[in-house]
Image (spheres, helix red, strand yellow):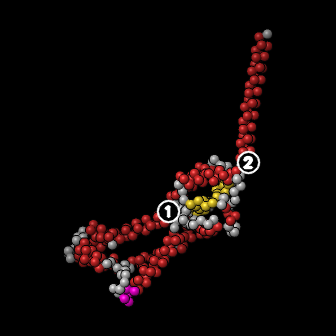
Amino acid sequence: MKVLKYGAVWSSDCLIAIVMVTVVLFGFFSKASYAQNQVNDKNEVILYVFYGQGCPHCAALLSFLDKVKANYPTLKIYEHEVYQNDENRKLFEELTAKFNTTVEGVPTVFIDDKGIVGFSQEISDSLENEINRCLYEKCIDPIEKVSTNVEKAIDKPFTSSEENVVVKKLTIPLVIGAAAVDAINPCAFAVLIILMTAALSIADKKRALKFGLAFTISIYISYFLMGLGLFSVLQASGLSHNFYIFVTILAVIVGLLNIKDYFWYGKGVLMEIPLSWRPTMKSIIKRATSPLGAFLVGFAV
């Protein structure tokens, strides 16, 4: 009797356990099925991101989108780098024209019929609101506004093959030629001559050599830092194309002014250090009696 009693109790416990497991599994699969249906009921959201390598705001936006994407299974993001890819830049310009959006740089996001420029907390909130709206409202694929047949694929990073193309375009003769043109700087030559004259008056050739080297190194460092800073600013702003146009126009104007100085010197704008500054500068240069002083003069020039 005891065996039957314990057996009956054991059978009853097993039955209860089986029922409980069945209920739990049924609830789990029902919930998963409901969640899947919820996902299927949501629209596909297509988003195009245009960014530039080295742009800090672009990096912040891409990081934000990586986090957001995990919460939206139907969200598709297509990334296009524009600094180093001419085709992507052309597509960017076409989209901005179709969306009547002024090209203000990157990052720029296109979703539905909207173009969103820049990145901030306010923009991230607005962008997520647009994503949520498009989940339940039928939004268009932004690329449909462009006639060009564009492959929907995330851009590949800047590969070694692309890098080789850039290196081939940037030849040594081209770099040397650009350096030679930039090196013809009458003001720097004039300052160097005055500085060397002051150094040679000390009758110490080694000291004069140190003066010249300090001045030359200072010029190199100052030009390098200016170029690096300007390059970083342009990368962050995404205005490199407009900057090229501006520099081209400025170079033509400066060239014309130099031609004017050759034929009509002293009239109008002079492309040189103002006459009123020269006595002060000459006095400062003559007081530069050490390599450190020559180095500082180089930065001033």
Where residue 297 sits: x, y (%)? 29, 70
Identify the secondary structure beneath mark 1: helix
Task: Identify the residue shown where x is 73% and y is 41%.
Answer: 34
Amino acid type at mark 2: Asp
Q: Which residue is mark 2?
A: 41
In the rendered image, the vertical position of residue 66 relative to residue 180, given as above or below = above
Residue with the most extreme left position: 202
Where residue 298 sits: x, y (%)? 32, 71
Q: Compare residues 175 and 150 and report the one nearer the observer.
A: 150
- 205 inside magenta stretch: no
Identify the secondary structure beneath mark 2: helix
Per the picture, the main secondary structure of the magenta-coloured stretch is helix
Q: Compare residues 267 and 255 and report the one nearer the observer.
A: 267
Position of 99 with respect to 9 (left or right) is: left
In the rendered image, the vertical position of residue 18 relative to residue 215, given as above or below = above
In the rendered image, the vertical position of residue 123 relative to residue 181, given as above or below = above
Q: Which residue is mark 1?
A: 236
Q: CA distance from mark 1 to mark 2?
A: 40 Å
In the rendered image, the vertical position of residue 43 relative to residue 237, given as above or below = above
Tag in front: 1 or 2: 2
Amino acid type at mark 1: Ala
Task: Identify the residue shown where x is 41% and y is 77%.
Answer: 182
Residue 172, visible in the rendered structure:
no
